[in-house]
Image (tube, grey):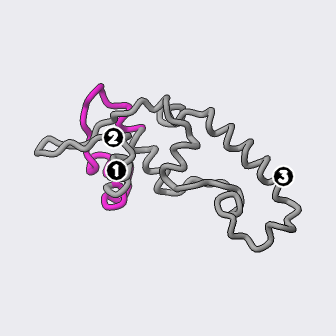
């Protein structure tokens, strides 16, 4: 089953919140945490990760917070999911070639085709479609 992790779900929620703010406005982890009932500690780690990925920028100081610095129409859902979770695949052998049964696997080719189809679909969905 394809399912977003809480980490990815919360990251999308935070980006959606920031996108709804005015141009250049800051928002704090506390503000997002309280508004959407997200663990402050977990959200802080997620925001740090989004900052390392150059989607948001942390601003230090008493009136600091985070601001969105990336156009979310430019990032596909596939790119974002990989940014948050690492390499994606329907089965492990798509991500790694460590499977002991690859030589005799009868479903390898169809699974690769399905995975490529899913990837193509997700590559054509900007995350702004989710965060708007």
Residue at far top of view: 23
Dominant SS type (magenta): helix
Cβ–Cβ under 8 Å for marks 2 and 1: yes
In the displayed structure, 104 sits above or below 61; it is below
Queried whether the magenta region covers residue 25, the answer comes back as yes
Question: Tag 2 or tag 3, which sits nearer the N-term?
Answer: 2
Numbered marks: total: 3
Q: Is residue 31 left or right of residue 64?
A: right
Give the crowd class for mark 3: few <14, some 14-19, many >=20 residues within 10 Å: few
Residue annotated with mark 2: 56
Q: Nearer the viewer, residue 71 or 32?
A: 71
The span shown in magenta is: 16-43
View extreme (bottom): residue: 100
Mark 1: give few (<14), some (14-19) or many (20+) Cα within 10 Å.
many
Residue 44 located left or right of residue 104: left
| Residue at screen point 88% across, 62% down | 106
Q: Which mark is residue 110?
A: 3
Residue in front for this viewpoint, 99 or 60: 99
Q: CA distance from mark 2 to mark 1?
A: 8 Å
Q: Identify the residue position indicated by label 1 in the image.
A: 47
Within 10 angstroms of label 2, few (less than 14), some, or many (20 or more) residues? some
Residue 21, how many percent across, how many down? 32, 31
Dot 3 lies on which element? helix
Q: Is residue 121 magenta?
A: no
Which residue does the image show at 52% across and 56% down from the upper left?
85
Question: Closer to the observer: label 1 or label 3?
Answer: 3
* x, y percent for residue 62: 11, 45
Helix or strand or loop: what does disc 2 sit on?
strand
């Amino acid at each position: 089953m394809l399912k977003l992790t809480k980490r990815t779900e919360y990251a999308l929620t935070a980006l959606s919140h920031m996108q709804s703010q005015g141009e250049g406005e800051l928002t704090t982890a506390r503000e997002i945490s309280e508004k959407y009932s997200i663990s402050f500690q977990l959200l802080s780690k997620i925001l740090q990760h989004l900052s390392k990925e150059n989607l948001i920028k942390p601003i230090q100081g008493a009136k600091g917070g985070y601001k969105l610095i990336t156009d979310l129409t430019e990032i596909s859902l596939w790119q974002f999911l990989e940014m948050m979770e690492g390499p994606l695949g329907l089965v492990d052998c798509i991500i790694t070639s460590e499977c002991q049964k690859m030589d005799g696997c009868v479903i390898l080719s169809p699974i690769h085709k399905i995975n490529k189809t899913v990837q193509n679909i997700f590559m054509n969905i900007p995350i702004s479609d989710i965060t708007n």
